[in-house]
Image (cartoon, rainbow, N blue to C red):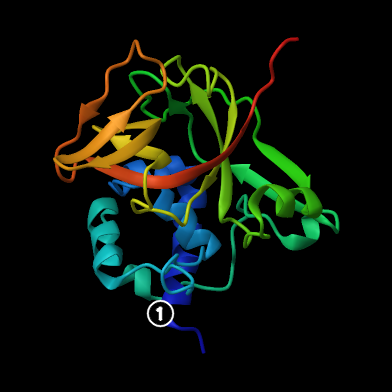
Amino acid sequence: MRTVEEIRRQNLVTLIAERGGQRAFAEAARIKNPAQVSQWVNRSPNATTGKPRVMSGTTARAIESALGLTTGWMDTHHGDESPVVSQVLETETPAGYVRFDLFEGGAGMGAGLVNQDYPEVVRTIEVAEWEVRKKLGYLPQPGRIQIITGRGPSMRPKLEDGDIIWIDTTCDYFDGDDYYLINIGGETQIKMLQKRGDGMYVVSVNPDFPTYRSEEGEVSILGKALIHAGLRRF
């Protein structure tokens, strides 16, 4: 017998397919943190408990309301037909490799980007397990690490426009002064976050972009930036 969490996930997959992708679904469902959609679909582990992330009843009701569905629709099994979705199975990746897929949308390294139809440099990469262990020190669960394209000049010279950045989507909280994928004012950015005596500061590497203190609740953390790679000319 399926649990209500499993039923919600299957219905979520159906809605994503109907809307044409996770980004379009998140916008229609008025989900403020689009990264949560990917975490629900991929059952990404909670960084604190280690348990797969699942959709709460409150969120299910909010989605139903936003999409005009009847109350309880997300909790009801609607048949065994499963739509085709872009979810990677372990069998699709060669043995000994780890596949990293695209985090929906680009990340601004300047004024920020609203993630809508922005061209991506790389959509999928497959990396040897030994190299992943070398870089991260562990092998992540499928879906945990996703890639994103950085855009803009504010993080130069550490990050250049078009660099590919690995994001740990399970880190949706402040985990010490470091580089994060954040959403602020509806825009997605790669920035350093620093906690100082009078609050949280958003920091750019490029001195042309001033550091500023964020208001409480203004910054939503979507993930932690781990590794970057660039396609640069010699």
226 relative to 68, above or below: above
> Which is nearer the eye, 36 or 10?
36
Q: How many marks?
A: 1
Left or right: 177, with 79 as reference point: left
95 relative to 155, above or below: below
Where residue 151 appears, as percent x and y from the top left, is: 48, 21
127 relative to 56, above or below: above
Q: Residues within 10 Å of mark 1 (few under 14, many from 20)?
A: some
Quarter of the rendering occupied by the C terminus: top right
Image-quadrant location for residue 81: bottom right
- Find disc 1 in the rendering and name its residue: 4
Image-quadrant location for residue 4: bottom left
| Residue 77 in sight from this viewpoint | no
Which residue is at 85% across, 54% downward? 94
Considering every residue shown, the one lying at the far right of the view is 95
Which residue is at 27% across, 24% downward? 211
Considering every residue shown, the one lying at the far front of the view is 197
Left or right: 16, with 102 as reference point: left
